[in-house]
Amino acid sequence: MLRHIRSRPFSSIVAGSITASTSYAFYVEHEANKQPFQKAENVLPREYDRDAIASYWMQRPISVVNRLSTIGYEIVPIIFNYVIDFKIFPDEDTSAIELKYKDHAQTLRCALTRLGPAFIKFGQQLSIRPDLLPPTVLKELQKLCDAVEPIPDFIAFKTIEEELGKNVIADQIEDMKLDLVAAASLGQVYQAKLKSSNQLVAIKVQRPDMIQSVSLDLFLLNQYGLFLDTLFGFLTEQVPFHVDFIDCFARGSYNELDYEKEAENQNYFRKEFEKRQFPVHIPEVIENMTSRRVITTEWIDGVKLADAEKSKIQELIPVGVELFLTQLLDFGHFHSDPHPGNLLVTNEGTLCLLDFGLCAEIDAVSRNAMTEAIVHLLNGDFDTLISRDAKDLGFLPQDMDVKELKPILTKILTQGILESGSNLHSRKRKLMGISNELNEVFFQYEFSVPPFFALITRGLGLLEGIALSGDPDFDIFKASLPYASKRAAKIYGARSFDRLLRRKNTSL
């Protein structure tokens, strides 16, 4: 042994350091887990708390490393095989390409399913982008919306009884019959009939250990944001924003685990839309059969909006856009997860919104600034948009002199957004053409992204994807103008709004 150390001192030191570090990591995790009441659901906070979650996982380094290894094990081969099959050795035969797409899509779907909720949600968002992926891949990924591998019924029923009472199924459910109808990333849904009212209901039951797996992925995501802020702070003039940006998404995702919070959101949206007589249906919550891990709502018969006839999609998408903008610009509490499984067309032809777990809030100042920004953008008033709206929304510091930045941002906004439409292929080409200007904004100016934009862009992206399946020429920006203009006129008064537009038109 001594002879080996003397002959290879460097490798021996490295090996010894790795062994010592690993042993210490195992010891730290063992000590953390052996404490009384150290189960994740007992220790991790019910309300999102980044520091508390970080403290929990910093004491479990082996679990963190294992998770990183699992992600790499699943994702790296997929990327490698894609590069080999489609970039290095592409096939020219159409049928062969189609088969490869199908094989790759199945592999990707299975990998995302195994990796859990955070990755399943990423796949859901991709599944409605016909401008990004071929139909074969979209069809496969759409299975992630409600056809994830379910947990056994006996585990789900055990959760129901733990949450709602030991005999709740026998006492409340007709014939004790619960039919599994969908399985998603966080839970699965059963159809049942209540004894007391003969009402059909949907009972959503959370999968086991969700708080542990979700909090670990959010911890890793936050560490990634911290790394980016450190890196960009060193290389650029950028104001650090990645941690806060990710934190907003993380807070919404973590709160999805609390079904009582979801019920509260659902009741709020139902009340607000009824008050405005908006043509959307929000299912009623059955309060006495709802808890932290079980939520029961009225059953809705219908089809997914994405699966409806193209004419029906074209008819209802304007309703969907106004639905989202009403949440965003009016009452400031918005549904951030309108994927295909959460937007239905009822048998009566009405749009129905489901699943209020992932929601977020936006303050009144930001709502008004965003309303003005949309109107200014789509009317080409870049001076006001850059010098005032971008500052009010937090993209630029309030005391910043934007004289040099105006021509650069004007080019980006004109070519990268207004002239590119919603098709992401077109938008990507346009943005590549102005890549120098984009780099200048990100690297040479104090530019940052407001935290709430993480969930706004997610929600709009999902809605935009569904719209594109019914209308390839759909433009989310132009579709937003009518409601934004109406909202601006309501906030500032019709005369002030008309003067703003006249002043802009005379300057053009």
Image: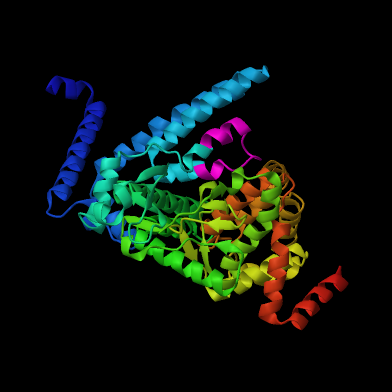
Quadrant showing the N terminus: top left
In depth, the one of 353 and 40 nearer the eye is: 353
Q: Which residue is drawn at 75% across and 47% down?
A: 473
Quadrant showing the C terminus: bottom right
In depth, the one of 170 and 238 nearer the eye is: 170
- Horizontal and vertical percent position of residue 502: 83, 75
In depth, the one of 353 and 373 nearer the eye is: 353
Specify whether 503 is left or right of 468. Answer: right
Q: Which residue is drawn at 62% across and 21% down?
A: 97
132 inside magenta stretch: yes
- Horizontal and vertical percent position of residue 338: 54, 53
- Horizontal and vertical percent position of residue 110: 43, 32
Residue 12, relative to residue 419: is it above or below? above
Specify whether 347 is left or right of 244. Answer: right
Specify whether 478 is left or right of 101. Answer: right
- Horizontal and vertical percent position of residue 407: 75, 60
Start and end of the magenta stretch? 124-141
Q: Residue 134's quadrant in the figure?
A: top right
412 inside magenta stretch: no
Q: Residue 21: in sight, yes or no?
A: yes
